[in-house]
Amino acid sequence: MRAPLAIFLLLLPLAACAGKTPPLDACAANAMCAARRAEPQLLVPEHSMRHGNDLVLLPLHGEKLIFTDNGKACEDADIEHCVGYALVGFSIPAHAFVVEIFYYEGGDFLLLDSGSGRKTPLNGLPVFSPDGAEFLVAPYDDETDSGPNNLEIWRRDGDGAVLEWAHPFKQAFAEDPSLEQLYQVAVSGWDGNRIRLVLTEPGTSRRWTGSIIRDAQGWHLFAKSPPDLRQSGPR
């Protein structure tokens, strides 16, 4: 569960007065703090920059895009208007920026074409294929509605993206009835028509590997947890 954004924003003035940034452990526990700490590594002067509360993106052929934090609303617990932004991805092969939007609780993602600036809403952080032509989204958020799918593969289409394949949340439990809760998914590799996965059942030590493989009929998920793991996974 994400810590409310307001907590992090309230810490900022205190940290600034002390000439310090929030401690690494405290920052890691807050999604926005961790994203903003990592953001400078993704900023490229010709394409993106930050000026205080403003994240500025410069598409090659489109208009300048400015995303402005509303920290005052967060400090005032104005849940409706509390918002913050962080650049969390920039892929040259995919010609795309990725911006994460943080609300008082939960958040969203935007894929933005680095040429036109066109925005495509997503339900999770995209992981791009090596050539940037496709990307996997694995939504997992216990605070907000992340849609009906726990896995999605998208294909870049012009300056946008189209959904190519989806795996519904409910299907995960039908395929693996022993699951007590939905697994989280991380990509460990993408080799042509095979996406290698590491799956973890939150709150347990249960971890296993899986794949999404493409054949002539399309993409297929192979992610069922091994029987011995289901029997013995300690809490």
Image: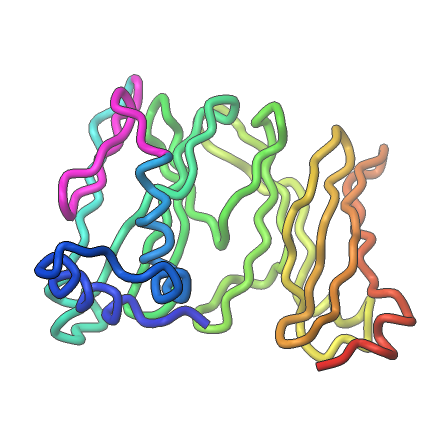
Instruction: Tell me if 53 is positioned left or right of 93 in this view.
Output: left
Instruction: Tell me if 1 is positioned left or right of 119 in this view.
Output: right
Please provide the residue range marked out in magenta: 42-60
Instruction: Tell me if 175 is positioned left or right of 35 in this view.
Output: right
Residue 106 percent across, percent down from the top left: 38, 66
Q: Residue at x 25, y 55 (%)?
A: 84
Q: Is residue 96 magenta?
A: no
Q: Residue at x 48, y 24 (%)?
A: 158
Residue 153 percent across, percent down from the top left: 63, 43
Residue 138 percent across, percent down from the top left: 59, 54
Q: Quadrant of the C terminus?
A: bottom right
Q: Is residue 55 magenta?
A: yes
Looking at the image, is 91 positioned above or below residue 206?
Answer: above
Q: Residue at x 22, y 72 (%)?
A: 79
Indicate how the structure is coloured in the image.
Answer: rainbow
Q: Residue furthest right?
A: 227
Residue 99 percent across, percent down from the top left: 36, 44
User: Which quarter of the picture shows residue 29?
Assistant: bottom left
Q: Residue at x 21, y 65 (%)?
A: 82
Instruction: Tell me if 75 is positioned left or right of 212 in this view.
Output: left
User: Which quarter of the picture shows residue 28?
Assistant: bottom left
User: Which quarter of the picture shows residue 70?
Assistant: bottom left
